[in-house]
Amino acid sequence: MVVYTSWIHKKLYKMTDIFNATVLCDNCNTKTKKILIEKDGCRLRALRCPKCDKTYFHPEDKQKLDQFSKLKNKSYQVKLRMVGNSYTISIPREIISYQDDIQKKLNKMLFLALEEPEKLSIFFKKRRFFD
Ligand SMILES: [Zn+2]
């Protein structure tokens, strides 16, 4: 695909616009269709050729998935500290910085749930069971 390399250089801002434009498959010249692909719990924007099934991932989303794959299943040891009547833990910076939108919402809420007797989960987005 011709526009792919220019996506990488223009990154973030221009990229979305180009992704919304009509893109032809470089394999068979057929008009590609916008789709969403779920991988490892990440939603990736992609273009797929209906004729030969060739898939072009949105470079920004692909990059996020690669970053996520590096962090996935990595475990950390963090200290529990008492602050007033609550306990605090430190979340390693690399976990927060892998996703821009989480960083933007950083001073907002995180959601906790004791999912199992020995498992405390932290969610960046509100889940149904918090309603
Ligand atoms: Zn094709």
Image (cartoon, rainbow, N blue to C red):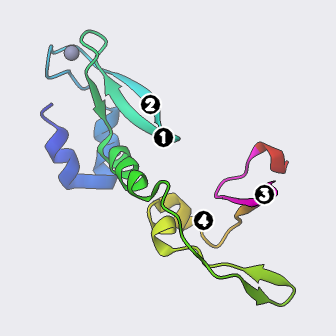
Q: Nearer the viewer, mark 2 or mark 1?
A: 1
* Residue 131, percent from left and from top: 85, 48
Residue denoted by label 2: 37
101 vs 49, left or right, is right
Residue count near mark 1 (Cα–Cα under 10 Å), binned few <14, some 14–19, many ≥20: few
Q: Amino acid at mark 4?
A: Lys
Q: SS class of the residue under badge 3? A: strand
> In the image, residue 99 lies at what x, y percent?
47, 59
Q: Amino acid at mark 3?
A: Ala
Q: CA distance from mark 4 to mark 3?
A: 19 Å
* Residue that protrudes farthest toward the front in the picture: 118
The dot on residue 105 is: 4
Q: Are marks 2 and 3 in contact (CB under 8 Å)?
A: no
Q: Earlier in the sequence, mark 2 or mark 3?
A: 2
Q: Residues within 10 Å of mark 2 (few under 14, many from 20)?
A: some
Residue 74 location, x and y as percent? 48, 61
Residue 113, disc: 3
Q: Residue at the location (52% across, 59% down)? A: 101
Q: Nearer the viewer, mark 2 or mark 3?
A: 3
Q: Which residues are magenta?
A: 112-127
Crowding at mark 3 (Cα within 10 Å: few <14, some 14-19, many 20+): few
Taken as a whole, is the magenta stretch helix, strand or loop? strand
Q: CA distance from mark 2 to mark 1?
A: 10 Å
Relative to 120, residue 15 above or below: above
Left or right: residue 102 versus residue 63 is: right
Question: Real-space Cα distance between discs 3 and 1?
Answer: 21 Å
Q: Which residue is mark 1?
A: 40
Residue type at numbered disc 2: Ile
